[in-house]
Amino acid sequence: MQENQHVLQALIDPGSEVSFISDPVHNRLKLPFHSINSQICGINSAHAATAQKLCTFSLLNEENPSKPITGQAIVLKHLTNHLPISSFQLTDLGSLEGLKLADPTFNKSSQVDFLLGADLYPAIIRPGLLHISPSLIAQNTLFGWVLSGPLPHHFHTFTTFISSQTESDISFDMNKFWELEEIRDTKPSISNADQYCEDLYINTTRRLQDGRYVVKLPFKPKTNINRGLGLSRQIALYQFLRSERSLASNPVLQSTYSEVISEYIRLGHMKKVDAQERFENGVVSSYYLPHHAVIKPESVSTKVRVVFNASSPSSNGTSLNDLLHAGPVLQRDLLTLILR
């Protein structure tokens, strides 16, 4: 198996308009993607999720790896529950002798990494259809034989379609309109994560002798972190060099930007560190923040400011923001403020 090839657990669902891939698998494979903004709907037009990434991938046939099938898949944090819902014995299905199954362990309940929809169904289906029993058929595919029909245990279906977020339902919009018009004086409930941030701020914030405050970053508990940070220096360096090339064409802006960075160092907001990634117990413990200039010529006070991007993914797809709680919303409801 080549380094850039991976074996995934896939579900073939011709009832789904498009294909899907789970976010952890997408990050692990580092598949190229572009941003989208789409609503994922299921049965009864129920809203299931909001998608923001569409990635490109290739499917390989072990018997003919020179002819891959290229497709696109929407990235979702979670596709479905483990399938089948519970494991069962192959003897419950009848004789499968002589069939080269696409997944010899399909009877074992496992996580679904990939969902192959109707967009790829014609490309992976091969001639060949067998009736295993009155209620069970076997279909030949690019990957081997797959089975269809009722199983001994309850089996969840996964049928979806996709619609643009710009399309809206009138009744839904009317409900949202009246919800906005309603003024609620009750204090909103606070989540466990927001309460954790509040407690961390109260218990750890301290003031230095020079009047500045020291506040700890609200890292999520380690039990909730599936993976640590990857390498980030090269990504930040690439952004820095790109900014340098852009600023070189505008000496005035370059000088102003350099002054802002120098001021950060002079005020103690930044300090120089060794140009090396740091590790603790074999896990990367350092994170390089990419930054760029934002120009506002109409601003009276600050025409140029530095923006740091803590959402920039590291080499394993995890960013600093992924490991931090966002914290509670501090301002009051905007409508209430305006009406007052």
Image: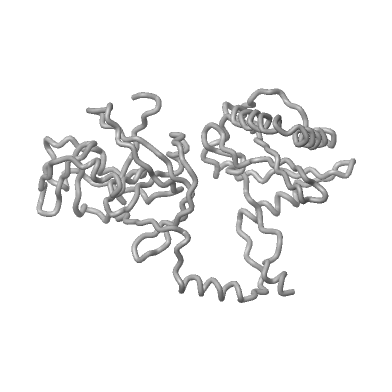
In the image, taking residue 231 as reference, residue 305 lies left or right, namely: right
Q: Position of residue 316 (x, y in %)?
A: 52, 33
The image quarter in which residue 235 lies: top right
Q: Quadrant of the N terminus?
A: top left
Residue 62 visible in the picture: yes
The image quarter in which residue 186 lies: bottom right
In the image, taking residue 317 as reference, residue 15 lies left or right, namely: left
In the image, taking residue 81 as reference, residue 199 lies left or right, namely: right
Q: Position of residue 145 (x, y in %)?
A: 19, 40
The image quarter in which residue 69 lies: top left
Q: Position of residue 41 (x, y in %)?
A: 39, 59
In the image, taking residue 62 as reference, residue 292 lies left or right, namely: right
Is residue 34 or residue 246 the one in the foreground? 246
Q: How is the image coloured?
A: one colour
Is residue 212 or residue 178 the one in the foreground? 178
172 up-or-down from 206: above or below: below
Number of dots carrying numbers: 0
237 up-or-down from 188: above or below: above
Kindly identify the residue that appears in the image at 78 percent across and 47 percent down.
205
Kindly identify the residue that appears in the image at 82 percent across and 49 percent down.
301
Is residue 71 or residue 182 the one in the foreground? 71
306 up-or-down from 149: above or below: above
Q: Position of residue 174 (x, y in %)?
A: 51, 74
Residue 270 visible in the picture: no
Q: Quadrant of the C terminus?
A: bottom right
